[in-house]
Image (spheres, grey):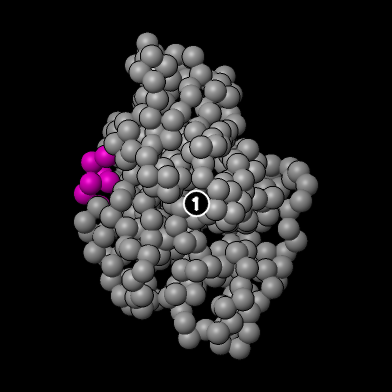
Amino acid sequence: MDKILINPGPLTSFNSLSYHLGPHLNKIRNQYIHGNSFEIELNLTELNFNDKINVSALAALLSTLKVLADFQGKPLETYFPWDPYVQGFLHNVDFFNIATKLNILSWSKEAVGGFSNYKLNPNTTLLYFGDNIPRHLNLSIEELEEQKFIKKRKIGPNFIVRAKGLMDNSGLDDLFIDLITNITLEFITNSLVHGRDYCFVALQRFSKRITISVCDSGIGFKRSLQNAYPEYSALKNINHTQAIILGCLIQKKYHGLRMAIDQVLNLDEYNISYYNEGWVIVSSYDTEIRWQKKNWENAKEIFEHIDLKQSMFSEKVILGEELKDRMPYDSIQNMGYYKKYPHKHTGTRVTFEIKLEK
């Protein structure tokens, strides 16, 4: 049997993951379409502790690898670097534990071990939630929202306990912690209910910021919206960029993705004494959108004048021109952006960050 060795690169960012992993996933799809038999193995030897492994990229990688392991019916044989610092980091964020518990990866016992348990940042961890709705169920938007409400009540206490280390001795006030918890639960239940897939979460708190990523390899915004809003014929031919925009803006009636993004970008409305410089990045398949306050408020204003029952909008009307070159970071923080990936990456990833400086 042929073997396909996939290499996600150094995992320094989600962009890096998409760039390195995309061609391998395309090869797997092509082999499957042509009916070829193959076995998938994973090469993580490019991980380098000095390159600052990105925990959000790790969460996205685990999500993808679970799909591949489920597809081939057994864990992926994995090769790690002989680096105690890399292995120690993976151990400390619970990567090894999750990979074995969910039968995602396997490895030689001689290849892993001898690392230090010292945590460079104890407020960094990976979590997962597997109570997802089956993909074959056809539910109305009201039924989907009811499922989200049920799952929030079910997994809320579990999430609070598992994320407790992130908040312990943080000096953050209770209102802020409640907001962070509710925002994260919204993204998690979106993956479980709308994405119809396992959800992998990366949590990281530094002295001046908190970053949380929620990743799945589910059906994505496009198919989810088409299922939830069959009355909108204009949704039949939308692209993934339009689908992300709609997924972020369409839900006004319930506490959904729109309100969660609003909360991240408008903390000043909650009388919290932190700088309001948060951002939200949403990516699905071939598109990434970074919402900053300016492009988010502009998108909401334009969306108010769009009638989905009549026609679909162009993404440029909402977002302006696609980012194709490097953009100064000051401009990114002010304007946000949207861009396309060269390869499609199944599912949805939402990352948000809030500065904690007073």
Q: Is residue 40 above or below residue 90?
A: below
Q: Residue furthest front?
A: 1
Q: Is residue 157 magenta?
A: yes
First to last magenta residue range: 156-162
Q: Is residue 223 above or below residue 24?
A: below
Q: Residue furthest bottom?
A: 310
Residue placed most toward the observer, 103 or 165: 103
Residue drawn at (42%, 60%) of the image: 195
The amino acid type, in three-letter code, at marker 1 is: Arg
Q: Report x, y in % for residue 265.
A: 51, 55
Magenta stretch mostly in which secondary structure? helix
| Secondary structure type for disc 1 | strand
How many C-alpha atoms fall within 10 Å of the one at disc 1: few (<14), some, or many (≥20)? many
Q: How many marks?
A: 1
Q: Report x, y in % for residue 91.
A: 37, 24
**To which residue does mark 1 refer?**
349
Residue placed most toward the observer, 227 or 308: 227
Residue drawn at (61%, 46%) of the image: 27
Residue drawn at (42%, 16%) of the image: 111
